[in-house]
Image (spheres, rainbow, N blue to C red):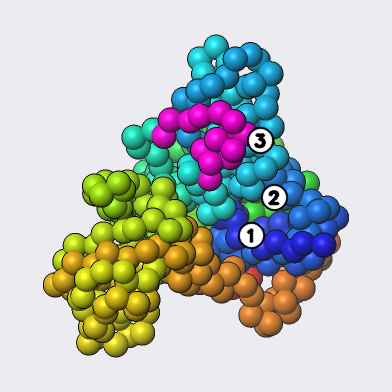
Amino acid sequence: MSEENVTLPVTGMTCANCALNIERNVKKLPGVKEANVNFASEQAAISFESEQIQTEDIIKKIQDAGYGVAKATVEFPVTGMTCANCAMTIERTLNKKVPGVVQASVNFAAERVLAEYIPSMTNMDEMIAAIEKAGYGAIRPDETLEGEDAELAARKAEIRIQTRKFLVGLLFTTPLFLLSMGRDFGLMGAWSHATWVNWLFWALATPVQFYTGWDYYTGGLKSLKNRSANMDVLVAMGSSVAYFYSLAVLLYPSLGKHVYFETAAVIITLIKLGKMLESRTKGRTGGAIRKLMGLRPKTATILENGKEREISLSQVKVGDLVIVRPGESIPVDGVVVDGESTVDESMLTGEPIPVDKGPGDRITGGTINGEGRLKFEAMAVGKDTALARIIRLVQEAQGSKAPIQALADRVAAVFVPGVIGIAFLAFILWWTIGGEFVLAMIRLVAVLIIACPCALG
């Protein structure tokens, strides 16, 4: 049986418990041998038997659990189709024979392919090669979204969303907090105790509760759907208790006199600040990989029929004769055929002194050519180059877990249910002994919220 290892960029995780949920769900699939999800780097490293399960099944399982995988979409023309059956053949080729293609559809009338794929697993050229092998043709679009850009775009979108929600929360929470505290400390006149002021508080708190805090409701529901409880459950419960009790007091004044809208709003806004900072930090975790990827040039110059031609890097094939001019990055691994130069190999060895290269010497993709012109034969391209292997090792390292994290995962699995149990116990004790519902409710909210910004979250 053939074992495959994939590293998938996962989106939608809000705490370490989400990573645990994904691991638990993926491991239920037949054929999956190992699954490690790193919350900090948002990477899922999965080992599985390709004869029993496909990458698409793993992606679907992650999506069914309520999370996402960063994907790219590309549309390009195809040629050579003569009937609708040809379109079905191309679809089947892409969906079944190209690992990393999530979904591909072919429009026979328009002669175009729309493909959704995982950039870290496949690329445009592999799809085109599969189509050509099936007996058809494909025209490469001038511009396609590179894999690392697709993942980076997903990270940036997450940062934008979290920042916008925090700013909206801050906009409404600041006046709500100042007015509420001013009234509680007697800094405002008798007008602040009028009924309409409480309705104003409600109007300020509602956008915070259901726009800024909506992620906590959806995240909590996803977690409960997977038969576990994460930090979102605590935030949603704590803020909802304060918000809905205050709303009940507005609708039925006999229940009490004081409202706690500012409590719910401040809780959500402060924790959203933490989420915003967290998303920005996670956005930088892939910086090392992106810098490594940046060492590769976008194009390469090959010698074809005695003429130089510039092509996309992914179109270089083993055996091609590649020309590297002075100062250019070497595109792929190979052996020098003609020319002499020095090559800066510091990205590989850390040695700042350039190394002399001549006919018969091996050169590595991503290194920098010196003052000479080199002609070399490509020996390793695409995922087989030394630089691609380094990138893959870094991704696997980021996706792996330290042994101590296994203990943290076991604690996290029971932490949230334990906190909820303690919170309700505190509520019952305070209500039973003290006899005051409001004081008991405040203790309940305090226990729920104090546990949210912990290391396990």
Specify the amino acid type for callout 1: Val
The residue at 64%/21% (across/down) is 86
Residue 313 relative to residue 95: left or right: left
Residue at position x 18%, y 67% from top?
373
**Residue at the disc numbered 1:** 6
Along the viewing direction, whichever of 377 and 20 lies nearer the viewer: 377
The residue sitting at the front extreme is: 305
Measured along the vertical axis of the image, is residue 188 above or below residue 381? Answer: above
Where residue 354 appears, x then y in whole percent? 23, 83
The reply to whether the C-beta atoms of the residues labelled 1 and 2 are less than 8 Å apart is yes
Q: Amino acid at mark 3?
A: Thr
Q: Which residues are magenta?
A: 126-140
Foreground: disc 2 or disc 3: 3
Kindly identify the residue that appears in the image at 63 percent across and 44 percent down. Answer: 98
| Quadrant where the image shows the C terminus | bottom right
Tell whether label 3 touches label 2 (CB within 8 Å). no
The x, y position of residue 112, in whole percent, is 51, 22
The answer to whether residue 18 shows anywhere in this view is yes
- Does residue 129 appear left or right of residue 348 in this picture? right
Label 1 vs 2, first from the N-terminus: 1
Q: Which residue is mark 3?
A: 93
In this rendered view, identify the residue nearer to me: 123 or 116.
123
**Which tag is nearer the camera, tag 3 or tag 1?**
3
Please, what secondary structure does the residue beneath circle 3 have?
helix
Looking at the image, which residue is at 79% across and 65% down?
A: 33
Label 2 element class: helix
To which residue does mark 2 refer? 55
